[in-house]
Image (cartoon, rainbow, N blue to C red):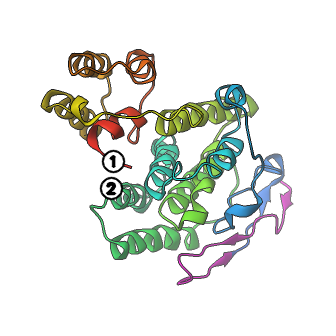
Amino acid sequence: MHYNAGSLLVVCLYNGRIGLAIRRPVPEPMRGCARRRIGRAEGGSRGGLMTEAEWWACADPVKLLASARRKKKLLTDRKFRLFAVECTRAVWDLLPSENGHKAAGVAERYADGTATKKELLAAHLAAVRDTAEEKDITNQAEYAANQALFSAINASGDRSNLRYAAECAVECAADDSEAVAERVRQCVTLRDILGNPFRPVAFTPDWRTGTAVSLARGMYESRDFSAMPILADALQDAGCDSDDILSHCQGPGPHVRGCWVVDLVLGKE
């Protein structure tokens, strides 16, 4: 098998506290797939201003993220990290080590304020150390496992790392059609988390009843969002007349942690 030697350069930075450069050969059939970069600044991403129609039609998560960053207070650190973790969860079964699972799990808890930065850094570095023990990649399955691990590393890294959790998850795809499907899934996830930035919704505190909060909290903690239509009923009973909120609850989903309606009910940003 032929190798594209030196095609991978990984730089891992966490708040300036660690630097790691790894260069590994990649099998020739996988050339062009090696994008497991970590720690690159956000500034150079593709995309920019979008129209509302383009926001809903876009199938490129990189462009959606670029557009979202232009909307003040839309892409908060918490929502950005929850999106990154959700990308890792899409390739959860491919993760080759428990440290990868732990890094993503701690990253999610950190986003919600239940893990410290020290815990996040420890989990992140443990996953990074796993990459130092890897052997040369010789087939697609090994490459997918490698990219899944780097997705977890990115999700537990600094803010500038987070978008690469999504790109590494795409790299796990076995072929181009799977890669396209994963990008589309990521866009659906991002819109579930961010909502419609062109139509901000004003949430009335009176809608935050005990029933609504209980339903939202239960779904958030269990990751089972099948009760979203029931949440719509509870919000309507409380006087909610927002078509955007109600239609999102009654729609087909899918929904994830960070769903903009559930976050509004729970008072999360």
Which residue is under mark 2?
Answer: 112
Majority secondary structure of the magenta segment? Answer: loop
Disc 1: CA contacts within 10 A as few (<14), some (14-19) or many (>=20): few
Q: Indicate whether residue 252 is drawn in magenta.
A: no
Closest to the observer, 203 or 98: 203
* Membership of 4 in magenta stretch: yes
Q: How many marks?
A: 2
Residue interval drawn in magenta: 1-21
Q: Which amino acid does the dot numbered 2 rest on?
A: Asp
Residue 42: x percent and y percent? 68, 62
Q: Measured from the top left, where is residue 186 in percent x and y? A: 58, 37
Q: Which residue is mark 1?
A: 268
Look at the picture and state if 130 lies above or below 73: below
Decide which of tag 1 and tag 2 comes sooner along the chain.
Answer: 2
Question: Is 11 on the left-hand or right-hand side of 268?
Answer: right
Residue ID at (50%, 35%): 200
**Residues under labels 1 and 2: Cα distance?**
9 Å
Residue 236, relative to residue 209: is it above or below? above
Residue 201 sits in which quadrant? top left
> Residue at the left extreme?
210
Tag 1 and tag 2, C-beta contact below 8 Å: yes
